[in-house]
Amino acid sequence: MNTLLEQLPKAAYWSFVSMIVMIVSVLFILLGLFNETGKEVLSSIFSLVMGIWQIFLFRAYNKACKAAIDSGNTSDVELACLQQMKIIRLLGVLMLLAFVFGGLELLSALVPGGK
């Protein structure tokens, strides 16, 4: 338990940094959204929603880490771990989607008459 509590300040710091990076990313997606048409708009809206979701998850994880650091309570540490699991699940789903659609893109390039 003490080892886990020693790592929480680093986790809180990096979740804050990740949140700031995602905020900047979402701002650039918003700027790019105004110049897109057709399918690109749907892709940008999906990226925007996922970016905003990640911002909220990183913020919740940051708050949970800080609460666990302040109290040292087992339930607060469990909440921080739960918030971390939510982030990992979302990133896993996003990676799976990128792998599936990227694979389909590669396969479509191999088909005669494709790209």
Image (cartoon, rainbow, N blue to C red):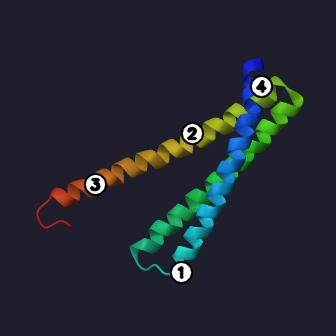
Q: Is residue 100 visible?
A: yes
Q: Which residue is mark 4?
A: 5
Q: Give how far apart the Cα atoms at labels 3 and 2 are.
A: 24 Å
Amino acid type for the residue under numbered disc 3: Leu
Q: Amino acid at mark 2?
A: Ile
Relative side of 115 to 91, left or right: left
- Residue where numbered disc 1 is placed: 34
Q: CA distance from mark 2 to mark 4?
A: 20 Å
Callout 1: helix, strand or loop? loop
Assess disc 2: are there few (<14), some (14-19) or many (≥20) residues with their C-alpha within 10 Å of its C-alpha.
Answer: few
Mark 3 or 2 closer to N-term?
A: 2
First in sequence: mark 2 vs mark 4:
4
Q: Please give the name of the residue rendered at 37% of the width and 48% of the height, measured from the top-left corner.
A: 99
Q: Residues within 10 Å of mark 3 (few under 14, many from 20)?
A: few
- In the picture, measured across the screen, residue 17 lies left or right of residue 43, that is right
Which label number is shown at residue 65? none
Question: For residue 14, what is the image quadrant?
Answer: top right
Residue for badge 2: 88
Of labels 4 and 3, the one closer to you: 4
Could you say whether the residue bearing mark 3 is in a helix, strand or loop?
helix
Q: Residue beneath label 3, please?
A: 104
Badge 1 vs badge 3, beta-carbon distance below 8 Å: no
Q: Report, in whole angstroms, how far the alpha carbon at label 1 lies from the one at label 3.
A: 27 Å
